[in-house]
Image (cartoon, grey):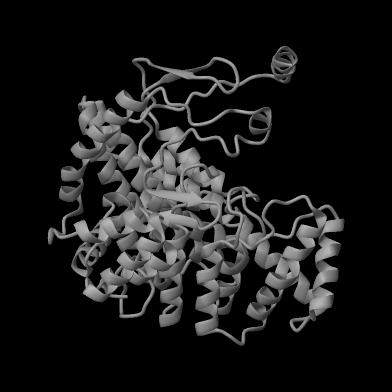
Amino acid sequence: MVFNRSVSLLSKLRSRAVQQPGLGNSVRWLQVQTSSDVDLHSQLKELIPEQQERLKKLKSEHGKVQLGNITVDMVLGGMRGMTGLLWETSLLDPEEGIRFRGLSIPECQKVLPGVKPGGEPLPEGLLWLLLTGKVPTKEQVDALSKELRNRATVPDHVYKTIDALPVTAHPMTQFATGVMALQVQSEFQKAYEKGIHKSKYWEPTYEDSLSLIAQLPIVASYVYCRIYKNGQVIPVHDSLDYGGNFAHMLGFDNPAMLELMRLYVTIHSDHEGGNVSAHTGHLVSDFTLSIILLQGLGRDMLMLDLVASALSDPYLSFAAALNGLAGPLHGLANQEVLLWIKSVVEECGENVSKDHLKEYVWKTLNSGKVVPGFGHGVLRKTDPRYTCQREFAMKHLPDDPLFKMVSNLYEVVPPILLELGKVKNPWPNVDAHSGVLLNYYGLTEARYYTVLFGVSRSIGICAQLIWDRALGLALERPKSVTMEWLENYCKKAA
C-alpha cells in the first residue's frame, strides 16, 4: 500500500504502544522519518557515526554484563537459546514472531509503501527500513526501485558459467554458482586491494550489496528458464518494482502473482541472525579475528582482538549463505512441503477428509519422517509469516483445494504432534503455506522454490552485512570442546 503519514495511523500505533510496550520502537521509527532525501547512501552516511558511538558506549559501559548461563544441552543442541550474536535488522520473539526494526509483519503491511493502496509492501521499502530503521516514503521507495533496476545487469560470463553445469543440476546449485561468478566484479575486493581504510569498508560493501540484490532476480530467473522454459529468457521490465519484476522474468504477469511475489520476498527477507543462512553469511563476512576463551561453562568470556582479517565480500558471503539455505532442514523445506501435500493428494485425493488426513500424518510419522512445514527452532506459536500467507489465500484463492487441505492440516497436525510429546512447537511455519500459493498461480516446480527464498534472504543478509562493516563487528570464534571434556567438566562440577 502507499505509505500514508496520516494522523490517524500514527494515533493507532501510539495507542497500541501504550498497551504493548514492545511497539515503542515502531512508533519512534515512524516519527523520525522526516527527511525527503531519496538517496539511501547519504541517509546511511548520517546514521553510521551515531551507531558507532552507541556500540562503543555499550562495550565500555556494559561489556562485562553476563547474558546468561551456558548448559550442556545448549552445547549438544546446536547452541539453541544461547545469546551470542549481534543482529540489528530484525529480532525474533518466540511468542510473537519476527519484528523488522521493531515492526511486526502486520505493521509492515500497514505502513510500508506498496504499488497501490491496500496492496502488499514493496521489498524495496523493507530494505530501506532494515538499513535505516525508518519507514520510507513512497518517493524514497520509488527512487530505490529505480536504482536497483539501473544496477540490474549481469555479465555474460555469469550465464556461461551456469551453462557449464548440466541442466539437470539442482536449481540451488546453479543459482549459487551464478552468484560466485558475479564475485569478479566486487567493488569491495578492488577497494581492499588498493588499501582502503577500515573505516570506509562499509561503502564498497554497500555498493556490492545493492548490486547483488539487484542482480539476483536476473540470475535466478535465468536458472528457472534454463531448466523449465527451454532457455527462453525474459528481460527486465523497465518500470516494474523488484518483486513484480522478479515474477515477470519468471513468466508471470498476473497482477495477483506480482502481489504474491512482493509479499513473499518481504516476509522471507530476514529472520534475525541465528538461522543457518543468515548466520553463515555473517560468519563468512566477519573480519576482525577474535579469540573467545571460555573460562568454564556459564562464566565470563574474554574476547581478544588480533590483527588479522577474512573480509569476504558480499558475493562470497551470500554464496555461502545460499549453500546453507539449500539444506532440507532450512530453505529446502518449502519444496518438501508441497511435495508432501501432493503425495497426500496422490494417495487420498484432493478432497480428503480430516480423518484420512490424520491417518496419513500418522503414517508419515511412524515411517520415521517428519511432517514438513510444522515446528520451528525458536517460535512457540503459529508463524506470523504463515498467517499473512493464509490471509492472502483467503482473499485471492479461498476455494483452491490445496489451500483447503493446508487449512485442514492446521487443525489436524498440531494435536498429533502434541500427543507425541516430543516437540516444543507443533504449529505451522512459513514453509507450510508458500508452496500452495505459488502452485496456484502456475509456479509448480517445487525444486525451484528455495531459489525464491534465496533471492528474498539477500535483503536481510546484505543489510546486516553493511552494518557489520560499519560497526566493525568481530569474527565469531567460539570455543569448541569434546565429549570427553564435557564428561570431565560435569564430573568436577558434581
Residue 479 visible in the snapshot: yes
**Quarter the N terminus occupies:** bottom left
Residue 236 visible in the snapshot: no
Left or right side of 386 for 204: left
As rendered, which of 133 and 259 lies closer to the eye? 133
Residue 59 at what x, y percent from top left? 33, 26
Residue 441 at what x, y percent from top left? 53, 79
User: Residue 53 appears in which quarter of the rendering?
Assistant: top left
- Farthest residue, direction bottom: 399
- Farthest residue, direction front: 18
As rendered, which of 21 and 432 lies closer to the eye? 21
The residue under the point 21% across, 33% down is 200
As rendered, which of 431 and 134 lies closer to the eye? 134
Left or right side of 419 for 461: left
The residue under the point 22% across, 71% down is 5
The residue under the point 78% across, 81% down is 352
Give the vertical position of 31 relative to 318 (above or below): below
The residue under the point 59% across, 69% down is 433
As rendered, which of 479 and 439 lies closer to the eye? 479
Residue 262 at what x, y percent from top left? 40, 69
Numbered label tally = 0
Give the vertical position of 70 relative to 347 (above or below): above
Residue 285 at what x, y percent from top left? 40, 34
**Quarter the C terminus occupies:** top right
User: Residue 190 appears in which quarter of the rendering?
Assistant: top left
